[in-house]
Amino acid sequence: MRTIIHDLDEKELQEIHFKKNDQIISSLNCKNSCIGCFSCWIKHPMECAIKDEYSKIVESIKYSDELIIISKNRYGCYSNNTKRVLERCIGYVLPYFTIREGKTHHKSRYNTPVPLIVYFYGDFDKEDKKCLKELVKANAINLSSPKYTINFLDNIAEVDKCIQ
């Protein structure tokens, strides 16, 4: 099973042919930002205190073979909706820190790391691509992903070709 977090609208989503067992998570419906309450770390590990369709997203990621993110480039970052969902996934890691690759990152909660694949679409300049590469690398290290891939696509139609 793959967990796919995306910011595609309904029309764009219809153009993508996902696999039967894919867990598809639209970031467009995520209206609640992480409130920094630490409940997902301490009180109810892996479960967000905000009770909505995203409260158990960590569980989806934990049992995935891959975590795929499809996001529009927004000034060298994920789209605001995608970023909001990813922030709600913080319970995937522990609240404790360790040094990896010379930088501070969260300790892993699980011994089953999930590969990370990110597809950015939209307009890019050289600086955007540099920022996005650094961002995805940091996310992969934080998630203890054994490998990560970043893809820059000109349009949504390219996503369908790539995720098969």
Image (cartoon, helix red, strand yellow):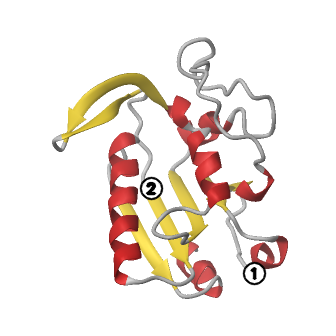
| Three-letter code for the amino acid on which mark 2 is drawn | Leu
Assign a secondary structure to mark 2. Answer: strand
Above or below residue 22? Residue 113 is above
Outermost residue toward the left in this view: 102
Where residue 16 appears, as percent x and y from the top left, is: 71, 76
| Three-letter code for the amino acid on which mark 1 is drawn | Glu
Q: State the image quarter where residue 133 is shown.
A: bottom left
Above or below residue 1? Residue 56 is above
The quarter of the image holding the C terminus is bottom right
Q: Residues within 10 Å of mark 2 (few under 14, many from 20)?
A: many
Q: State the image quarter where residue 10 is shown.
A: bottom right
Above or below residue 156? Residue 146 is above
Where residue 89 appears, as percent x and y from the top left, is: 57, 38
Circle 2 residue = 116
Circle 1 residue = 15
Can the viewer see residue 1? Answer: no
Given residues 161 and 21, the one toward you in this image is: 161
The residue at the point 63 percent across, 16 percent down is 44
The residue at the point 65 percent across, 86 percent down is 157
The residue at the point 57 percent across, 46 percent down is 86
Give the Cα distance between marks 2 and 1: 22 Å
Q: Residues within 10 Å of mark 1 (few under 14, many from 20)?
A: few
Above or below residue 58? Residue 11 is below
Q: Looking at the image, do the residues carrying marks 2 and 1 touch, with CB atoms under 8 Å apart?
A: no
Which is nearer the N-term, disc 2 or disc 1? 1
The residue at the point 83 percent across, 78 percent down is 11
